[in-house]
Image (spheres, coloured by chain):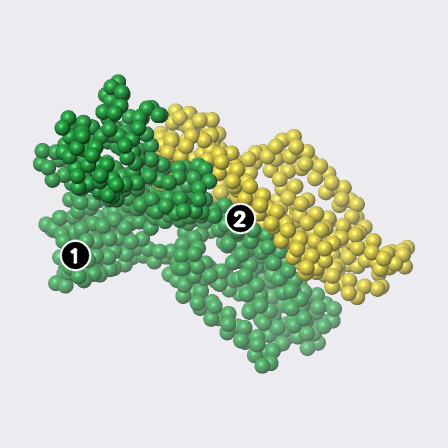
Chain colours: A green, B yellow
């Protein structure tokens, strides 16, 4: 293969990479979508506009941009753009005036409601769900908004304890009902990283996560008389004032459900125990039931509930009734089911970002990067003329490849763009321009030494790429320890920078070098001035 | 167009004095006016409020006090305000922030609340130091293997010079140092070597055919040969970072400020510190000592 073929091969390789990048990158952001179930069949539709109509056709439910004669309108969806709405950038559902089908959200019948992503709502008998459109480059919570929390044990915990804590924490986080929440171990298994996109009540979520979950059961009768009267919901037991008969590990399941007892409306919590628990529970309830004595359930020493024993329970299956609301019952059930955390977790770092603020940060960052990119491109064109224009293609391809790689990693769930990541991108723009400059300068210099454009191109670009390889490698070497050791926010910066360096070198080898060589063979000799090359030195 | 020729090596003592003075100020600042470590290192809360309409600093301060935010330190940003305060626990911090936002009529979507526990801050600091040490070792090893240890050592001297100046400016201005600052600083370590590597590459290339002049003279020629690209790569790296500093918003400014100082200092130190030190060191080798004797006076 001669060298010219090699150059064209490099272009072909680059073309494949760039087309691949476009494929992953476009569309930059997909529309939200709504999906539904109709019996065993299901359907889904993109919500590309700001409103949509839910209707019924002969074949079942359908969602369209506007009402039409083939379907009967049953509800309308309107995108919420008002930044004061409690559920930002989501949708509001409203019943159609000429429909009798009830809309229900979270078990309640409504005529209109704000919907957060992932919430199931039903229209008539059909369950619907709205999913958020994915950006081709995933945005971190500091840009899209949400609560991220790093929980660490208050004293070093072994990996097994942290694994259990992870499972329990996942249960708690799931109970918050936030779609796309993630819970993972980080930092050598010494921290749990929780991400809750678009969460509304951060303080409430932190409360649920932050409970250490030391769950205890106590016979109120075993307390000194003066203390007995004080045992009420929320009462904090004095340290060492009591002796529990059982702790939370014996609970196998707990759930909340609507009360079936007409005289006591509201919600109840049911729980069941393992064999050990059942035996202890049977003994205690048998002893307590004749006097309807109370049993206090304590979480971290505070009374969460102190029901009176109504009957001896020997099967273990227990129902706690009280005047619970749905939320209270669910909370108690979660606490019971989560059982005792093997370690005490404290939120070491929390970051709660409002979505509008996040998008504003994204806008500022992207604007800054674009302006920087533009000024550098103009400077290169003025200084290097013809080659400056060539560098536009280099920089353009670099940007496309770079974003494409980020999109590929995003779709594999391995990348999320954060603010530090934008800083990494900005620094990489400078790096990419530097590489082009090294190539053009070296090339000009070799021509000034009296070499022909053809020879200068080959040797000059080779030397220049070797130089930038070394310079890039040193920058890379300083990013690797950052990626390996630094805190999670800084990791994003290091990773983005490393990807930028690799993309930069790829473009230098697959595009800038072959392009300079090919141009030198055919074009530069004919219009040397345009390329900023002294005419006298050109003899090709 | 005649290329300018600058006698960097001849003026090296001037550069050393300039660097010495700046370093003295930087180190003095670091000693007498310690770094203002951000709450990320000490533990505390940062509340960011955007779209605060017509609220003034005094109003925000009063609102923060009545919302119970302890020791609130209010700073205006280009989109609103940032309130730093001491540690109160994450749940309380969220509740105080909500109260503060409500009293200033700021929507929950325009609010950011970050809390950091005190021990986590120590953890972050230790990790940053670990990354720093590993970074330096990696750089030293790479340059020693690819070039030679004398280049590695003088390169790292220039880099410490840049890091000290950057930190000194932070101390002087009392600008809070955040983990983002540290990340930027660590990157500067690598990136400030970019120019140094470009110069060293050329010096090494010219060393191979060195016989007609002294090492010092050849090093100066090398610097002048790469002068245009030194200016251009410096500018093209600096432009995007300065854009980030001016347009990028509060968080990105943390990165951009350190990066800007580091890039300027790094470009300067590669010709004013690393190269002269390296040339002086090399000139003590017997081979180049002989050349220096041979051409003494010819200069």
Q: On the rendered structure, is A270 left or right of A380? A: left
Q: On the rendered structure, is A387 left or right of A157? A: right
Q: Is residue A367 above or below residue B101?
A: below
Residue carrying label 1: A55
Residue A462 coordinates in the image, percent (x, y): 65, 68
Do marks 2 and 1 share a subunit?
yes
Q: Is residue A322 visible?
A: no
A444, B89: nearer the viewer: B89
A303, A123: nearer the viewer: A303
Residue carrying label 2: A485
* Residue located farthest toward the left when viewing the structure as drawn: A262
Q: Residue at x 70, y 76 (%)?
A: A539
Residue A447 coordinates in the image, percent (x, y): 70, 69
Q: Residue at x 25, y 59 (%)?
A: A45
Q: Residue at x 24, y 19 (%)?
A: A225
Pick the quarter of the image with the C terminus of chain B: bottom right
A464, B69: nearer the viewer: B69
Answer few, some or many: residues within 10 Å of disc 1's Cα (few below 14, many 20 plus, some between 14 and 19): many
Q: Residue at x 16, y 40 (%)?
A: A258
What element does badge 1 sit on? strand
């Amino acid at each position: 293969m001669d060298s010219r073929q090699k150059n064209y091969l490099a272009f072909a390789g680059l073309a494949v990479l760039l087309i691949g990048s476009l494929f992953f990158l476009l569309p930059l952001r997909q529309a939200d979508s709504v999906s539904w179930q109709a019996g065993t069949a299901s359907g889904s539709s993109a919500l590309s506009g700001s409103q949509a109509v839910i209707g019924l056709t002969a074949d079942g439910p359908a969602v369209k941009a506007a009402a039409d004669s083939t379907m009967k309108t049953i509800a309308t969806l309107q995108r919420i753009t008002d930044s004061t709405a409690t559920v930002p950038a989501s949708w509001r559902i409203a019943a159609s005036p000429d429909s009798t089908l009830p809309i229900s959200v979270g078990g309640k019948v409504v005529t209109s409601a704000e919907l957060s992503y992932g919430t199931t709502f039903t229209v008539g008998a059909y369950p619907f769900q709205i999913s958020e459109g994915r950006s081709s480059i995933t945005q971190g919570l500091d840009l899209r908004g949400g609560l991220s929390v790093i929980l660490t044990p208050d004293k070093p915990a072994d990996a097994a304890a942290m694994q259990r804590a992870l499972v329990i924490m996942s249960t708690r986080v799931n109970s918050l009902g936030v779609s796309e929440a993630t819970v993972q171990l980080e930092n050598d298994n010494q921290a749990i990283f929780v991400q809750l996109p678009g969460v509304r009540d951060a303080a409430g979520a932190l409360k649920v996560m932050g409970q250490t979950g030391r769950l205890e059961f106590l016979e109120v009768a075993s307390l000194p008389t003066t203390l007995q009267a004080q045992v009420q919901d929320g009462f904090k037991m004095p340290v060492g004032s009591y002796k529990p008969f059982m702790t939370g590990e014996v609970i196998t399941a707990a759930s909340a459900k609507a009360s079936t007892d007409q005289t006591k409306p509201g919600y109840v919590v049911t729980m069941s125990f393992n064999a050990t628990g059942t035996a202890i529970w049977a003994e205690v309830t048998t002893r307590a039931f004749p006097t309807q004595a109370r049993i206090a359930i304590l979480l971290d020493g505070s009374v969460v509930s102190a029901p009176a024993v109504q009957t001896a329970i020997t099967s273990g299956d227990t129902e706690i009734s009280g005047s619970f609301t749905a939320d209270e019952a669910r909370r108690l059930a979660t606490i019971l089911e989560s059982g005792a955390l093997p370690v005490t977790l404290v939120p070491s770092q929390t970051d709660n970002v409002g979505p509008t603020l996040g998008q504003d940060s994204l806008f500022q960052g992207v604007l800054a990067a674009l302006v920087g990119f533009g000024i550098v491109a103009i400077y290169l064109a003025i200084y290097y003329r013809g080659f400056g224009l060539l560098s536009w293609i280099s920089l353009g391809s670099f940007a496309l490849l770079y974003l494409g790689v980020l999109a590929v990693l995003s779709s594999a769930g391995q990348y999320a763009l954060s603010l530090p990541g934008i800083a990494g991108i900005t620094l990489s723009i400078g790096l990419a321009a530097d590489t082009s400059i090294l190539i053009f300068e070296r090339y000009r210099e070799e021509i000034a030494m009296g070499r022909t454009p053809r020879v200068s191109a080959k040797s000059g670009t080779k030397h220049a790429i070797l130089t930038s390889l070394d310079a890039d490698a040193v920058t890379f070497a300083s990013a690797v320890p950052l990626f390996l050791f630094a805190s999670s926010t800084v990791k994003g910066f290091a990773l983005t920078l490393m990807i930028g360096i690799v993309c930069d070198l790829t473009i230098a080898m697959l595009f800038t070098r072959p392009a300079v060589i090919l141009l030198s063979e055919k074009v530069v000799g004919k219009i040397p001035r345009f390329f900023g090359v002294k005419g006298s030195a050109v003899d090709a | 167009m005649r290329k300018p020729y600058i006698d960097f090596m001849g003026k090296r003592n001037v550069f050393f004095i300039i660097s010495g003075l700046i370093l003295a100020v930087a180190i003095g600042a670091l000693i007498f006016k310690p770094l203002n470590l951000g709450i990320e290192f000490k533990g505390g809360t940062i509340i960011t409020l955007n779209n605060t309409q017509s609220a003034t600093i005094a109003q925000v301060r009063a609102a923060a006090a009545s919302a119970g935010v302890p020791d609130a330190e209010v700073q205006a940003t280009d989109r609103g305000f940032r309130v730093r305060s001491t540690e109160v626990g994450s749940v309380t911090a969220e509740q105080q922030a909500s109260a503060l936002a409500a009293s200033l009529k700021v929507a929950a979507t325009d609010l950011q609340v970050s809390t950091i526990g005190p021990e986590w801050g120590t953890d972050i600091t230790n990790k940053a130091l670990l990354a720093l040490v590993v970074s330096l070792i990696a750089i030293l090893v790479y340059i020693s293997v690819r070039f030679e240890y004398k280049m590695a050592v003088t390169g790292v001297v220039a880099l410490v010079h840049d890091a000290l100046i950057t930190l000194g400016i932070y101390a002087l201005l009392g600008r809070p140092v955040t983990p983002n600052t540290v990340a930027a600083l660590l990157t500067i370590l690598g990136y400030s070597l970019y120019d140094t590597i470009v110069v060293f590459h050329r010096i090494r290339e010219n060393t191979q055919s060195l016989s007609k002049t002294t090492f010092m003279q050849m090093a100066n020629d090398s610097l002048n040969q790469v002068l245009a690209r030194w200016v251009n790569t410096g500018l093209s790296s600096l432009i995007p970072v300065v854009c980030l500093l001016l347009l990028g918003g509060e968080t990105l400014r943390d990165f951009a400020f350190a990066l800007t100082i580091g890039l300027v200092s790094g470009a300067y130190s590669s010709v004013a510190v690393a190269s002269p030190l390296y040339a002086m060191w090399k000139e003590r080798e017997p081979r180049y000592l002989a050349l220096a004797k041979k051409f003494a006076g010819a200069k």
